[in-house]
Image: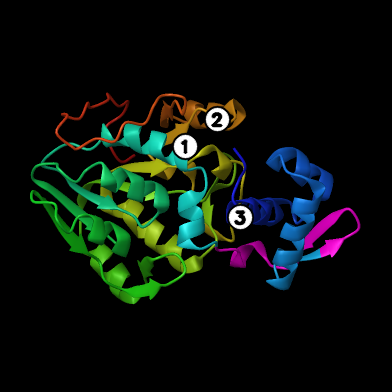
Amino acid sequence: MSLLAEERRFRIREVLSRERTVTASELIRTLGVTAATIRRDLEALEKEGVLVRSHGGAVSRTSSANIQPSYESLGRSNRAEKQAIAREAERLILDGETVFLEGSTTVYELARRLLHRNRLTVITNSPPIVAEFQHSQHVSVISTGGELQKDVFYLSGVWAQRALSEIRVDKAVLGVSAIDPGYGVSTASQAEAQIKKMILKSARVSIALADHSKFGNQGFAYVGPTTDIDILVTDSGTDPQYLRPLREAGMELIIADVREPSVETDGHEPPKSRARSGGGKR
């Protein structure tokens, strides 16, 4: 199935954020489109100021620190993988718990699967997640408040940090935009990195959700070492070379099979808890 123009251009941005340069032949091969389509995509991104076209490809004109795709673009990217990851992560959340759900598109997919839980308390910095729980009868919802980053629908800043400094939760679920076994966890925004740091400190158990495209990348703003994460849920497309050192470091890994049909749950099926090695925060 051919990709939409916005998703193709999002993937081109991702490549440029990692490599700084890209060839047209590489894009044609990885995206499965014609040379004419790639030429139009590069022209459009050049007009946006993202890149400068060169002979046979393009060079990034934007620092990787500033590459922040829209929330809508992120939501469409790797949607099947995100839904499969959410399906596995759902089993880690138990009725009666207090959980923090961070404002990421993968965590949003998890939130949609928790609407009919009982005695669940959700704390979040995500306006879309707050709205999703609007009609949920048995889930209590608390928003951190804070400054809205409009492009990514994310609440951050002093007010959000103050709220996070005063809470302790059973589990925190956060999205990961860049993870490298050697470097650690990072992201494109310093404001987002600060929120993630505080989320990790506030939780008894930290759960990270990351599809295969997030591995081997280093973002502008450092969040912390991978050892800050207790459980990582990813998809079956993730290269084992990235998972091996994480497993050896003691992280619990859950691999979601993207080929398994993602059946939308109404929340009445009781969640299955998975055994963990270790006892919460190290």
Residue at horizontal 55%, vertical 61%? 69
Q: Which stretch did the figure color magenta?
A: 53-68
Instruction: Please state which amino acid type lies under the numbered disc 3.
Output: Phe
Q: How many marks?
A: 3
Write down the quadrant of residue 54 in the picture: bottom right
For label 3, the residue is: 10
In the picture, the quarter occupied by the C terminus is top left
Residue at horizontal 14%, vertical 56%? 135
Mark in the foreground, 2 or 3: 3
Q: Is residue 232 visible?
A: no
Q: Is residue 206 left or right of residue 218?
A: left
Q: Position of residue 29 (x, y in %)?
A: 76, 38
Query: Residues at badges 3 and 1 in contact (C-beta under 8 Å)?
Result: no
Say whether residue 100 is magenta: no
Q: Is residue 183 visible?
A: yes
Q: Is residue 126 left or right of residue 245?
A: left
Q: Nearer the viewer, residue 264 or 104?
A: 264
C-alpha span from label 2 to label 1: 8 Å
For label 2, the residue is: 237
C-alpha span from label 3 to label 1: 16 Å
Q: Nearer the viewer, residue 180 or 32?
A: 32
Instruction: Please state which amino acid type lies under the numbered disc 1.
Output: Glu
Query: Residues at badges 2 and 1 in contact (C-beta under 8 Å)?
Result: yes
Residue at horizontal 19%, vertical 37%? 266
